[in-house]
Every structure is written in C-alpha cells, then in structure tokens.
Image: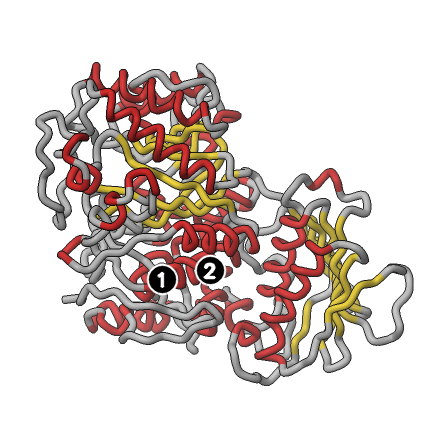
Amino acid sequence: MVTVRLHNTTVAKPRRRDPPVSQRRTLPLLLAPLLLVVAAGATSFAAAPAATQRAAEARPLGQVIPAPASVSEGGPSYTLTRRTRIKVEAGSPEARQIGTYLADILRPSTGYALPVSEWNDWDEWDGRGGIRLRLGSGADSLGDEGYTLESGQDGVTITAPKPAGLFHGVQTLRQLLPAAVEKDTVQDGPWTVAGGTITDAPRYGYRGAMLDVSRHFFTVAQVKRYIDQMALYKVNKLHLHLSDDQGWRIAIDSWARLATYGGSTQVGGGPGGYYTKADYQEILEYAASRHLEVVPEIDLPGHTNAALASYAQLNCNGVAPPLYTGTNVGFSSLCVPKAVTYDFVDDVVREIAEMTPGKYIHIGGDEAHSTSHDDYVAFMDKAQSVVGKYGKTVMGWHQLTGAKPVKGAVAQYWGLDKTPAAEKAQVAKAAKNGARLVLSPADRAYLDMKYDKSTPLGLSWAGYVEVDRSYDWNPQTYLPGAPAESVLGVEAPMWSETVSTNDHIEFMAFPRLPGIAEIGWSPASTHDWSKYKVRLAAQGPRFSALGIDYHRSSKVPWPEE
C-alpha cells in the first residue's frame, strides 16, 4: 500500500526525499524492463543510439522531445569549455533573464563560470566562442514561440522573434547536452552539441498540464517544481484546479471562510491548506519566468461542497453541510435560484481576474449531477457573463456545450474513446458554432490513470493508460465532426485523489507528460511511436539527473543507469 502524505520540497534541482514510488512496485513490474531487454537481445539497444551513446558523443539534433519541426544535421560540433560565455541581445532584459536562467542550469554540473553579458556586434567573435541568444533578426515567421538553433565550431546561436521562443530554444539546448548537465554537482564532460540547424515552432498554441490542488493540497514550492518539469518539454499552460468538494485553495477577501475553513482539509482528512494572494502571485510570477500562463479554475456549480460548508447562505436550505474528505462526485450544487449565488460568483471571479494576467478563467461545469438541466443552463449563462464582464475568456469542461457557450468560449473535452456518439456530437456541434476546444481525453491524457493493474497509485475508471496509448492519438482527428481549426491544443490533467507528494506527481506524469507535450508541439508527420520510444528512452537518465521518480514502463527500451 502507498502511504499518502504531504511534504514540502525545494525548487532548485531537489533530490528525492521519500522512498520513491518506483521502489514500491511489485517484483514482476521491476523485472519487466529487464526481461524485455533480455528477450529482445542486443538489437534493442542498437535501435536506440541516443539512449546508449557514450558521453563523448554528441546527441543528434533530432533526438529531443518534443520533436523539432525541421532539423538539418551536419558540420562541426561545439563543445562548452571554461572559456565559454553566454552572450545576449544588447538592451533586452528578457534575453538577459533567459541567459541567466541558462547559466544557472549549466554552472553546477559543468563547474564553468559561464558569464552572461551583452553583445552588440553579432558578426564578430573574440575567439572564445559561446552561446548567443538573439531576439528578432528576421525570424518573425516562427511566431511567438518558434526559434532557430544553429550549432557549429564557434558556438551555438538561438534566435527567436519573442522571448518565449528563445526560452523554448534553451530547453532544446539543454536536451542536446548530456543528461548529467541537469545535476547539481560538478560532473565529467565533455559538453558537446552536435553541428547543424533546428528550425522549430509549435503545432498548437495551447499545450497544458493541470494540477488538482483541491483533493490534496500542494505547496508553492511543489507547484514550482512541477512548473520546471513542464517547461523542459515546452508546456505553456498551467491549469490549477483551485476548488472542489474537498478543499478551497485560493484566498478570496470578500468571502474569507472559503479558504480558512473550506481549505482546512483534504482527501483522507489531512490538514489541507490554501494559497494566500501573495502565494498565488508567487506562482504566477514563477510560471511567467518559465513562459507558462496560469489558468485558474473554480469548479461550478457542482464540486462545491467546500464552499457550501463555508457559507450556509449558498445552500438552498440555508444549512451548511459538513466538510468532505471522501472521493465521490456529483452530490453538491450551488443554489441556482438564489441571488446571493451570483454575488458569490461575481466576487470570486472579480478577485481572481484582478490577480491573474492570463486570458482564461475556467469555471468547471462537469459532473453537476445535483443540478437540474434547466438550472445548469441558467447558471452557466450567468457565470459566463461574469467572466466576460471582467475581461477574461471563459473555459469549462465539455459539459458546458450542453448549455449555451458564449462566443469564443473554450470547452475542455475529457471524454473517452467509448464516450457515446451523441455526447461527442454535441461538442462537435458547439465547435462548428464557434466554440474552441482543448482536448484532454481521459483514456489518453489523464495522468492520474494507472499504467496497468499493478500501478500502486492512480485510478482506472477510464481504463489503463500506458505510455504508448497516451502518445498514440491525433488532436486534429480525435473528435469526429469537430473542425480542425477549432482545436486550440491539448492538456494533461493530474487529479489528486491518490496523489499527495512530488514523488507521486512525477511517477504518474513521467514518462507520459513529455508525450502529450509532443502531441501539442510537434508536426503530425513526426508522430511515430516506434521512433518516439527511442527518444523517450534517452530521457531516462535526464529524469534521474533531475531527481524525477519516473515509471520505467516496459513499453520503452530504457538504458541501464
């Protein structure tokens, strides 16, 4: 049995604290990868050169995740040395910030000083070589998040139209260096980047991951750690599920008991917790420094027991229910006819909108089984107008399409392959009428689903979701009848009924999250499980270097470490 517990973590390359989840698995699961390798023989590793390359060899430019849009390999490689410097665009604080971020990653493992300084004349070097970070310079066709990376004997140059693209290019550079570059103590080199050029830009603008902080609360430090892991794979949205039956996790000044009382517990009866406005601001700023936008969610009108317990007047009978620490769903509902309900919604949305610079506010809308259909439609009409009133774009789970989505609303689809055709058709119809879609099919993208029956964490109501299944789907064609242009992107939710520590998050997210990130970033033409699993295997040592307790799926030819 896995013990559910809550603990703090540090942010800067923390190591494992608890016995990792991977060490709690049964013996047959531990032996599965070894037996797969023995059965396959040496040819398994011959098929995975990136996973078994010697430290002295440079990783091929295409052997990163997500797969780049275009790769041209060849020419001399570049090796970082003690003389290497990081040069950034003169007069660009954004480029300097990214250069400092890169230096902070590389210095502990290389032991090099890697000074960061501005550079004006990009046509001349002083013979030392280095890493150059440039904004603009005719790369506008790559959009807000695209970049080029050029590597040769004189150094590596990353060029992007916007800071986000420059940051994403830095993540590619990290993966081109040996995995040991992620460690926080000095390691042996060499630190070589293969020669050639990468030209890259995302397929979709929305590439998200959701963290449920309501069923189990996660501290600011724990959220930051997950943000850093998401950023490595170019995820650009952090969806925070801030309220549910088991806990309210964000301070609202006008309704203070939501957090102080409604946030005082969690699944299993633990201490819970909530984010002060200062805490939330810290998360927002940290996410922005990693070029992630935070999408806050207040789930309405169901999943509201924490709110109903905090304020009796939100209940139709005027009686507050007790706090809830179980895992059932669908039993709670705001009182739709009451005027105070909309005072509550207005105040909550207003305060969150004032704090949140991103464009979206997510209002939930799923599993409102205790709300009649007519009441649901009436409530969502009013709630959507409140979100618009405060200048935000409304998001909701795909049940929103059973009401009347406002123009430009985003429906997050979480159905299954086997979801009834009528429900899928309802979502597709809304998309044809102007709704936008973010796809999170539960039997593909839910990171809290078990890998197989022996997985010690997670749920299985959507089925088992192994690594290959989570990768093997195409957002453009997944929902029949939905226009391809209606799809904004993808998101990988992590619900936390059984997840309460960073080790738990990491074991369930890795290695599936990088695959979802690739589905959102890379061209459809690059999607090939047989090739992807080789690139994924090469990430194993990087996961380990970062202290990530990942699931060693037998579907992947992991190298020995």
Residue designated by label 2: 229
Kind of residue sitting beneath label 2: Gln
In front here: 400 or 269? 269
In this view of the protein, which residue sits in the foreground, 353 or 141?
353
- Residue in the picture at 8% in, 33% down: 319
Quadrant location, the N terminus: bottom left
Q: Type of residue at label 1? A: Glu
Judge the density around disc 1: few (<14), some (14-19), many (≥20) Cα neighbours within 10 Å. many
**At which x and y percent is residue 514?**
45, 54
User: Marks 1 and 2, Cα distance to the nearest angstrom?
Assistant: 9 Å
Q: What is the number of callouts on the image?
A: 2
The residue that label 1 is drawn on is: 506
- Please, is residue 471 above or below residue 113 in the view? above
Left or right? Give the position of 376 relative to 287. Answer: left
Q: Earlier in the sequence, mark 1 or mark 2?
A: 2
Q: Which of these two is toward me, 36 or 360? A: 360
Q: Residue at the spot x=39%, y=59% of the render?
A: 220
**Where is residue 114 shown, x and y percent of the image?**
70, 75
